Image (cartoon, grey):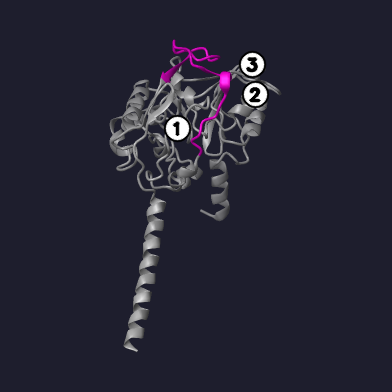
Amino acid sequence: MTTTTLLETARNGLGLGSGEWPEPLADDLAYVRTGIVNLLFFGPEGAGDRGWVLVDAGIVGSASTILKAAARRFGPESRPSAIVLTHGHFDHVGALRELADRWDVPVFAHLMELPYLTGRSNYPPPDPTVGGGLMASLSWLYPKAPIDLGGRVKALPTDGSVPGMDGWRWVHTPGHTFGHVSFFRDADRALIAGDAFITTKQESALAVLTQEPEIHGPPMYFTPDWPTAWESVRTLAALEPELALTGHGLPMSGEGLRSGLHLLARRFGELAIPEHGRYVGRSAMADDRGVSFVPPDVPHPMARLLAGVGLGLLAGVGLSALAGGNRRSSS
């Protein structure tokens, strides 16, 4: 692969290529990639003001991209009737406050996700020791503090309906976060999965850039409850989706989607759960007020490397001093 091709692949993988967003998925579905993450528009082209819904809100700094994409699809100055969230991690709510205030629009999320959207609780710390890739190793730098939307954010209806999205239902798919949800439409088996499963190896910077479609479990470094995450994948596999857009990676459809999802549901323990890590064998816990328990930290791989280098330097200094002392004694 030439340098030019590699750079173009990277730009496309981050949503910075020459194509214009949004990318259509169905008559009333289109998606936008902002950096490392996807978001979705629900509503037909030309739906106009308050005629559509935004699902998730991208990374920090993506508001302009989302506004331009919405204007292309729905018309200039077209505002959504609602913003609905799969979950509240930093890469899914980066532009949320700016857009919600600009559009004067309500935001909906699962009840268990509200503490992280109203400033009441941090998420559990990420685990940079899992996954083995650059994205995972850097995860200790990622924001985990909550945003505070105040009264603008509300709990999703308890009857399973999705505001502004007739024919859809929300499905509680916890594990990656405590209040994570996916959205499903029975009529055509379309699935908005969030990060319950994804279609790229998110721990690897190279995979994020190249966007080769393959089904994976939720991002390892930000998943604090692996047994529950496995159950959520089983729940989604049982829906037999025809089309899926996940929070990271390309859309997938048809038999390739279903067979890959069923394989993940059967072999989640070996394909998705890391061998070791902070949340392996002992999950974080939370209630409707936020996080209530986090397992003890495990050593960061960079800390181990630096400690090894430091010990090596100390040993070198000690040996050098010892050798110098021996030379002085012999003289």
Query: SS at mark 2?
Result: helix
Query: Which label was assigned to residue 106?
Result: none
Q: Which amino acid does label 3 sit on?
A: Arg
Residue carrying label 3: 50
- Neighbor class of circle 2 (other Cα within 10 Å; few <14, some 14-19, many 20+) is few
Tell which of 222 and 24 is nearer to you: 222
Q: Between marks 2 and 3, how big is the CA–CA gap?
A: 15 Å
Query: In x, y percent, where is residue 198?
Result: 43, 33
Q: What residue type is labelled 2?
A: Asp
Residue 306 vs residue 254, the one in the foreground: 306
From the top left corner, tell me how far across and down residue 100 is, in percent: 62, 23
Indicate the secondary structure of the residue bearing disc 3.
loop
Q: Residues within 10 Å of mark 3 (few under 14, many from 20)?
A: some
Q: Quadrant of residue 264?
A: top left
Q: Is the magenta stretch mostly helix, strand or loop?
A: loop
Which portion, as a residue range, is magenta?
143-171
Q: Based on the displayed image, in which of its 4 quarters is residue 285 positioned?
A: top left
Q: Nearer the viewer, mark 3 or mark 1?
A: 1
Q: In this view, does 317 lie above or below 202?
A: below
| Residue of label 2 | 101
Q: Which of marks 2 and 1 is nearer the N terminus?
A: 2
Mark 3 to mark 1 CA distance (whole Å): 32 Å
Which of the two labelled residues, at mark 2 and mark 3, occupies the earlier sequence position?
Answer: 3
Q: What residue type is labelled 1?
A: Tyr
Frontmost of labels 2 and 3 is 2
Residue at the spot of label 1? 123
- Helix, strand or loop at label 1? It is loop
